[in-house]
Each structure stands twice: as C-alpha cells, then as structure tokens.
Amino acid sequence: MQTRQTKQFILNALLEDTFHQDITTNLLVPKTKVSNAYIFVKEDTVLCGLSIVKQVFRKLDKNIYLQTYFKDGDRVKKGTKVMFLQGKTRALLTGERTALNFLGFLSGIATNTYHYVERVYPYKAQILDTRKTTPGLRKLEKYAVRCGGGINHRHNLNEMILIKDNHHQISERFEELVAALQKFRKKNKKPVMIEVDTLEQLKRFIKAEPDFILLDNMTTQQLREAVSFVKNLKGKKPLLEASGGITLQTVREVARTGVDRISTGALTHTYKIIDVSMEIKNE
C-alpha cells in the first residue's frame, strides 16, 4: 500500500515525533553505526501495515534492508517475528514507535474484522465497515478491514445514493423521491440504497427499486420477515443489509436471519490495538 496519501500519513506521524530532532538517539548513537533488528507480535493477530512499516524506515534510511516473512492479511501466532531490518541504528530507533504504532493500530482493525467474518461462517452474510472512521485515516482503516476479510462500504458521499432516515424527514412526497431516483438512474450507474427501520417502510420503499435496502436497528424476527418478503418478490430483488448496534456477540444471530450483508461501525471504532515490539540485536 503505497500512495501519495499514505506517504502523507507517514510524514505527518514522523513530524509529530519531530523525527529530525531525536536528541536522545543523536546524543548516544554515532551516525555511521549499523544494527540489526526484528519486529515481532506479542499476541495472535491478523497482520496489517507491513508495507507502511517499510516506508517509515525507508524515509529515515533509504538504504535500509528489510525482509518480511509474511504479508498483510496473514494470521500469525504470539511471539512470531514478522520482519527483519538492517540499517542505520539512528533510523531504527527514531522510526521505531511510529512504525509500531501503524502496525499495531492497523493489525488491530484487521484482527477485529477477522473475528466478525469468522463468527458468521457458514452463513452467506458479508461483513462491511461504515464511515465511522478516524478523521483523516479512513483509507488506512478500510484497507485494514479488507485485510481482515471484510468488505468496504462506501468510502465517501459520492459513491452511492444512500437515503437515510434524516433524508426521509426532509424529503418531499414519496412519489417525488421515486421520480428523482429514476431521473438520476438515466444519467448514472451508481448504486442506490434506502434505509428503513420498519417492515412497513420496507414494503413502501421497495417500489423505488433500490439496489440495497438497509435494515436499521431491526430485531432478528423483523429481519427474518424482511428476508422472507424480499425472497417472494417477483422481478428485481434488492440485497438486504442489516445494521445498527451489531456487535461480535450478536452478529451470528443476525447472519442466521438470511440477510445478504451486515455493516457495523464496530470494525473501526471498537477494537484492540495489537501489541507489537522491536528488538535491536548487535550481532
């Protein structure tokens, strides 16, 4: 994962540490000193962020040698060495915390997502993230979701039409909403999703022929009824997505209802950062 935006993330993180003024390292370590180091995980995890770790250290030492034993998305056990580094000791020490912060943070999201995906097996429901992401870091967090086996929902407001409850409150009559969607579809191929929170709304808005129906905060009984209703429809059938307060403890019961998709902000806002470490070896 190497884009202009990623490079900016890395630069911002290094600047936050005033990497060019590491007074401790510069005082104690000669410029020419070279060391070896290993990065390892201190708990079971799904890895994410290895390429960013590389970029952090290469920003500080363009000639550093890095060898990764795994790739993003791999599952590894506690105590596993995931990367070997050989380069300027100053670069290793100065970049250590920034690199490990990225690796622990992104691996935490990837691991959390993996647990959700694992929990719904063997049901058909796909696990999706939301836009409940850390401001400015959405691209990285959604990448971590993919590494964990999840699927990205829309990245921004321009990717799809998503008519939510607040849009219902301020929109005009239903007939005008349908007419607006039909006009939009003549010029655009972007998908359309409509959020509903009752079965009555589902039966009403299905007439607008959306690609997706977002079933918000429904009980499992309501979800089963929605699945049954759509299954018996003739013609175009929208995919059904359950959302609203879904946790690792409840996601399996939701998947059992037969919905096609489950989206939860918990993938990116309720996770545990993975404990990772780096050890320098003067061999």
Image: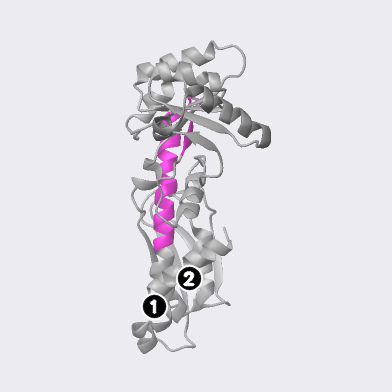
Q: In what quadrant of the picture does the C terminus appear?
A: bottom left
Q: Residue at x 49, y 48 (%)?
A: 142
Residue 5, picture quadrant: bottom right
Please name the predominant secondary structure of the magenta segment in the image. helix
Disc 1: which residue = 18
Q: Dot 2 surroundings within 10 Å: few (below 14), some, or many (20 or more)?
A: some
Q: Kindly state the secondary structure of the residue where label 1 is placed.
A: loop
Q: Is residue 122 magenta?
A: yes
In primary-sequence order, the first of circles 2 and 1 is 2
Residue 186 shown left or right of residue 122 in the figure: right
Q: What amino acid is labelled 2 in the image?
A: Leu
Asked if residue 180 can be seen in this view, the reply is: yes
How far apart are the alpha carbons under marks 2 and 1?
A: 10 Å
Residue 101, image x and y in percent?
39, 62
Residue 18, image x and y in percent?
39, 78
Residue 271 shown left or right of residue 62 in the figure: left
- Where are the magenta residues, as a range? 101-128
Q: Residue at x 52, y 22 (%)?
A: 175
Q: Kindly state the secondary structure of the residue where label 2 is placed.
A: helix
Residue 207, image x and y in percent?
54, 18
Kindly check if marks 2 and 1 are in contact, taking CB atoms under 8 A apart as contact.
Answer: no
Residue 172 shown left or right of residue 220 in the figure: right
Disc 2: which residue = 11
Q: In what quadrant of the picture does the N terminus appear?
A: bottom right
